[in-house]
Image (cartoon, grey):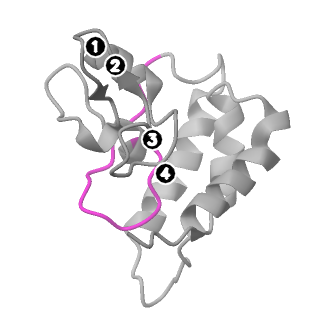
Amino acid sequence: MRKLTFLLGEAGGKTSANPKDGPLWFGSGEAIRLDWPLQVNDSELDFTAPFRQVRWMQDLLKPMSLPVGAVTSGQHERALQYIQVLHSFADRDIQGLIIPYGIMPLHVSKLLPLLGWYTGMLKSFHLKFTKAQLTINMT
């Protein structure tokens, strides 16, 4: 079940108090929420891995390298260069380089196709990302 939750990611909507908002499992006769923020890391699954691998905002997480085979053939070095730039943004002096909340560095757009993203979906992804970042939670 935890592997399925890991694969689903945050598919299904935002986390909220509404049990219908987000991925659910009904196999035990009751609804069990599978939202990533509700999961706990263990030795097998690290639910912070995607954020640690491609982080550019300052946080308490330690950077993490990409797993072997995550990048399309022959593009590993280029992907590592993009990731290194993103990690340097996260470790920057925030007084010297301000990245407004909701802004996605260009290096993310360059990295995603190397991870197998269809380039035709990048504009839609940017729009959804910005919309999610700018959404104000009134609860």
Which residue carries the number 2 mark?
A: 25
Which residue carries the number 3 mark?
A: 21
Q: Secondary structure at mark 2?
A: strand
Amino acid type, residue under disc 4 in the picture: Gln
Q: Earlier in the sequence, mark 4 or mark 3?
A: 3
Instruction: Say left or right for 11 vs 112.
Output: left
Find the magenta span and give its range: 53-68
Label 1 environment density (alpha carbons within 10 Å; few <14, some 14–19, many ≥20)? few
| Vertical relation: 108 (above or below) 57 | above
**Does the CB distance between marks 2 and 1 fall below 8 Å?**
yes
Q: CA distance from mark 1 to mark 3?
A: 18 Å
Q: Earlier in the sequence, mark 1 or mark 4?
A: 1
Which residue carries the number 1 mark?
A: 1
Of residues 65 and 47, which is closer to you in this image?
A: 47
| Vertical relation: 68 (above or below) 126 | above
Of residues 41 and 99, which is closer to you in this image?
A: 41
Q: Residue furthest front?
A: 29
**Quarter containing the N terminus:** top left
Q: Earlier in the sequence, mark 1 or mark 3?
A: 1
Which residue carries the number 4 mark?
A: 84
Q: Residue 110's x, y, as percent?
A: 71, 45
Of residues 49 and 5, which is closer to you in this image?
A: 5
**Does the CB distance between marks 1 and 3 fall below 8 Å?**
no
- The tally of labels here is 4
Of residues 16 and 11, which is closer to you in this image?
A: 16
Q: CA distance from mark 4 to mark 2?
A: 37 Å
Amino acid type, residue under disc 2 in the picture: Trp
Amino acid type, residue under disc 1 in the picture: Met
Label 3 environment density (alpha carbons within 10 Å; few <14, some 14–19, many ≥20)? some
